[in-house]
Amino acid sequence: MKLLIKLFAFCSLIIFSGFSAAETPKIAVLVEKDMINFAGQPTLLPHRIKDILAEYGIDSVEIDVQKMADKSYFNTDNFTIIILAYGNAFPLTGYENLRDFHTNGGCLVVNGIPFTHPAEKKRNTWHDLGHIDYVHHDKKGMGTGNFGDPATAINELRIAENNPLGLKTHTLPKINQWVQHLRVDTLAKEDEVIPIVETRLGAEKWAPATAIIKHECPMFKGAMTLWLGQTANQLHEKDYYFLRQTLARGAAYMLREKSHISEDQYKAVLTKVDGEDAPSQSENNLTPYKEPRPWGNTFLPKSKKPAEHILAVDIDTLRADERIALACLQGLTSRERPQIWLSLSEENGDFWLDVHKKKGYIDSFEYVKDWKSLFKKFSASFKGGIIPDDKLYRGNIIAANAAACEDFIIVNELIAEELNIDIKMDLRGKFETYAEGMSWVWNNYSDQLSRHLCDVIHESRFQNTAFAYDIQWKALMFWIAGPKDAVLPGADPIAETQVMERIFAETAPNTAMLGFPWNGEGVGLGEVGGTSFCGGFGKSLVCTDHLPNLCITSGVVTGPLKQRKQPPAPKLENDKIYISLVCSDGDNQNLWLTYFKNYVEDKHYGDFPFSFGMGPAIYDLQPAVAQWYYENAAPTTEFISDVSGIGYMRPDDYALRFADKTGVYEGFLDWTGKYLKLTDMKTLRTVGGGDESLRTYINHLDFMHSVFADMGRYSGFSGYENLTYTLDNMPVFRCHTTWDKGPKGFIEDVRQQVGDHRPAFVNAMAHCWTLESISIAKRDFVDQMDEDMVLVTPSQLADLYSQHKQSDAVKE
């Protein structure tokens, strides 16, 4: 049932009979323009909190950081509570006065893991200074406590019995999910913690996931903190309902405890919130859309064979509107035969054109100086122009979907005149909200838009021309706003989520979501939120948000790829630590054009075993690029599947919306197995998921030599015996390393996790954004290794581990 924000008559809102309109509200809400929102609940939007509270008759006032810093204004004489809804992030501007407020008994409402990511404003832009704890009882800390990670990948949640807010079980968004908890042992011993929501840590052990902290310590005596945590961390109506309920109840509770409202007034708030209908749970009983892929039996659509002679355009110096028009033309002409290449120097355009030429996939190419002439040359491929609403945030996405179906070029009045294109559709002022526009798109074009391909694309990315492939194949383009971009014109994340839930329910699972759901902290669903939400509908991410010319590169057919033959594994020695160093983020298709090419061209490449994760979807999208890497690989380089299979997904979230989750999941593994064989990969890296998830992989992909589990040691597993073991007769190598401590922290992680175990067998993920080159990997990892450490390839690691287990079995 759709949850609507109800508007009540003014008289019915006056719950607190002692309040008058002239009184200063006792609650402040921090609303700071462009402030970073780091891992906050996506439905708890700062600019909407005042209205939420008003629905329950609770007055509040919005303040910015300048007002928060003003000691004469923001103090406990004027305010009792401040609500900080930016998740882990908090502004350093005004922090000193905020801490004074808390020291003097002022109350906090916080979400995420508060006071762990200070933000600083420089040149009108907020910058996250990284993870720095301001949570402790010290001179700089706020005394709100640190966090602990869950015991397993998915934890059980429950409403705490007899909690003072009167919350009931039906308010919980999900009973099972991954959430971090409040570590009570990091608070002052005098503080009282009242759990509101608890998360299971063990058979009989629970920890607070949402809680009220009554500070009785000398430093913050008399203050209270409503620690919302991460309990409602999705963009669903149930999450929004929980946060509304908890926010209103918690604010009223603290006002009562501070004697600003009476017991009767507090009960009146509870009566009002109790009367609000809870939304129904999202239905997880979908039947998969059954129609086969219209382009055939490949995971992603492949263009027809590119033209022998390619027409290239240097777009480095072109305006954004010129690039966008050219991308539309590239996509539309590629339906018949790909022949336009849009060259960006940052993507090594000439180099890859030469590679395609040398391999015989094209005969020649030339740069077209008069690029505008292409619109005359290919005028039969389009029917006119469409003007987006540039005043509506993401108006260009709405226009792009229509353009793909109507064979239009996206234009403004200037470029339309320059190219002599007749304007056939003008969307300016047509929609009040983006959600309304996307509903119009689906209602009018669902019979034309692809049910097997979509692209999560931010409006700023159109100028990089990657969307040409979407135009070619009529992929549904979309973007759901996050906490930060929710303030922009026409944005409504909850309504947008509802629209996309309806659309995704009518599309096929085990299909790709192109693009990337993050465009800066708090902008969009985010990587985790995006892969979880879309993964529930059976869509895995193939990251292409900056990848041009797929219209041409996907038209190449190489045949199955073959990895280079590796040298034999070194002799097994029982006093050694064998380490496989595998570079991360190879599922990011963008990186293969330039970033990883720099690794292969590094002077130290080949000096030691160094492997790469690679998204198998490259076989459809950029087969000639993949072929170049295979042919130029060192003998001790191995390519493994990155991340989780044919596309990036989170096993615990995948296909949750379907009645037959197992059947959909197995379909994903069928595609994965097919493409692992086409790319000659013998193992894969997963992200998240416990052993039950790994068993599904192992039983379905029994040709693998092992499983390289986890993108870094962030899945709740720690200690050698929990990281390296056998599962259903297959070696499992969970990642031993993190990237929290920078480049030199990788070796330290290996030492800590391995301890005294010998021989030891280690999956050491080389985080590509930390070990940014082979030379850095050599300097900060290889050159720092102990004498008993030996680098090997993933295949060699599996072989050595199997030898060791066989030796143990013989001894027994």
Image: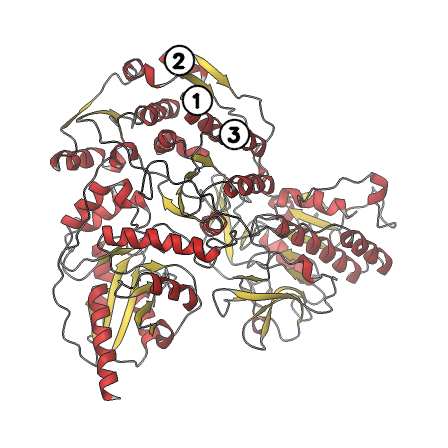
Three-letter amino acid code at the position of disc 3: Val
Image quadrant in which you'd find residue 207: bottom right
**Rendered location of residue 396, percent (x, y):** 47, 28
Q: Relative to 407, is 120 above or below?
A: below
Badge 1 element? helix
Q: Residue at x 21, y 81 (%)?
A: 575
Q: Which image quarter is the C terminus in?
A: bottom left
Q: Which residue is disc 3 drawn over?
A: 441
Answer above or below: position of 477 versus 636.
Answer: above
Mark 3 Cα shell of 10 Å, populated few (<14), some (14-19), many (≥20): many
Earlier in the chain: of badge 2 and badge 3, it is 2
Describe residue 122's horizontal placement relative to residue 709 as left or right.
Answer: right
Task: Indicate the secondary structure of the residue bearing disc 3.
Answer: helix
Q: Secondary structure at mark 2?
A: loop
> Residue 635 at what x, y percent from top left?
13, 58
Camera-near label (2 vs 3) is 3
Residue 630: percent from left, percent from top: 17, 50
Q: Which residue is mark 1?
A: 406
Looking at the image, which residue is at 78% across and 46% down? 24
- The amino acid pointed to by label 1 is Glu
Q: Is residue 360 left or right of residue 692?
A: left
User: Where 182 sits versus 14, above or below?
Assistant: below
Residue under numbered circle 2: 421
Mark 1 and mark 2: Cα distance apart in space: 14 Å
Q: CA distance from mark 2 to mark 3?
A: 23 Å
